[in-house]
Image (cartoon, rainbow, N blue to C red):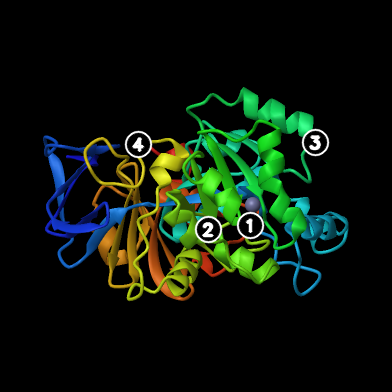
Amino acid sequence: MNYKLLTLRGAATSIRGQLIHRDLHLGATILADPPPDALKIDLEGCTLRPGRVNAHDHLELNHYPRSKFRDRYPNAHLWGEDMSARLDHEPFRSLRAYPLEDRCFIGGLKNLLSGVTTVAHHNPPHRCLYQSDFPVRVLKRYGWAHSLHFTPESELIRSYQATPPDQPWFIHLAEGIDAVAASEYSRLKVLGCIGPNTVLIHGVGLTAHDIADAAPRIRGLVICPTTNAYLLGQFPPLAGWIAAGGKYALGSDSRLTADGTLLDEEAALNQLFPQADAPLPPSSESHILGDPRLAHLEPGAYADVIVSEGADLRLVIRAGVPQFGDPDLMAKFPKIQTVAARLFGKPKSIQIDLARRIHRCALNEPGLEVDALPSRSFGWFRR
Ligand SMILES: [Zn+2]
């Protein structure tokens, strides 16, 4: 019996938003046929969905408190200037001193605990993000620039031109409600950085003219509603974007400006577009991030699966391996060694390698307590 070959049986399964009933066969990817000698797990009563995809985060910035220095900003560049001026003040000075690996790890853990299994990281592709003990899958093939305000034009053009056309190129754009934000799309176009792989982050200040031009032409728009509400008091023109044929995805941004996790962004989006009015068309993470193995459960997809019951997230499986979940569900996987934990007081079980990494981290994830590892599970005793 191989714990990496699983058949999840008897659960309602959501494939591309549609609820169906079928067994799900898991290796590191979703398999078309039951794997030989697979462990069969009964999850009757639960719903299986693809792991969530977070299309925008800054993984090394999630141990900071949510911060702003005025009630509302006309654009996020002014917030960025305010922030930069305080980096040597407390608490930022001390928080910046933690090792990069630990700061990134907290970002990964925040995502995993909210059922996110893949993240598009906006910043340099730090090596630690791609190590086997990193909690989530991080998009590997991408280009990026910070913004028109904080990236010199020459560097921005160089970055765009260096990104192969099949890979997404991300930039914060029109994150504001003033004339500066409204001018940014045309400025980026003049620089030659609008094309089929351009992905705009935020886009709150896009004009109707920008939307008509961009929606059919670029890869997509990533929205982060709680960050926009916090800094700007306004949301991006998503309905117009979709009506013009634009693709979109949801991002959490970091805790420096966001309300919480991707779950809070989903809640904010649902409030903006109540199902009863005009149902929102599905988001396009796999298209925007350029990886067809994401965000579905058909054969060939990553075996990244979240299991829920009603609104409760009960279990998160990444690449066919259960990572954390409710103790009764984690106990269904006899080959997975776990450590007891509590998330905001609720009992959870955490896969032992992840628990070990959590204990090594100098930073704490809010709300998470993990028991000590059993002494014989230390690396040098492991077989
Ligand atoms: Zn951002």
Tell whether 142 sits left or right of 115. Answer: right
User: Contact (CB < 8 A) between labels 2 and 1?
Assistant: yes
Q: Residues within 10 Å of mark 4 (few under 14, many from 20)?
A: some
User: Contact (CB < 8 A) between labels 4 and 2?
Assistant: no
How far apart marks 3 and 2 lie (CA) works out to: 32 Å
Q: Give whichever of discs 4 and 2 has the lower sequence position.
A: 2
| Residue 340, quarter of picture | bottom left
Q: Nearer the viewer, mark 3 or mark 4?
A: 3
Q: Which residue is mark 4?
A: 292
Q: Nearer the viewer, mark 4 or mark 2?
A: 4
Query: In this view of the protein, which residue sits in the foreground, 351 or 44?
Result: 44
How far apart marks 4 and 2 lie (CA) works out to: 24 Å
Q: Which residue is mark 1?
A: 62
User: Contact (CB < 8 A) between labels 4 and 1?
Assistant: no
Residue plotted at (63% across, 57% down)? 62
How far apart marks 3 and 1 lie (CA) works out to: 26 Å
How far apart marks 3 and 4 lie (CA) works out to: 33 Å
Q: Which residue is mark 2?
A: 110
| Residue 130: x %, y % from top left | 52, 35
| Residue 160: x %, y % from top left | 64, 29
Q: Which residue is mark 3?
A: 152
Quadrant occupied by the N terminus:
top left
Residue plotted at (24% across, 52% down)? 333
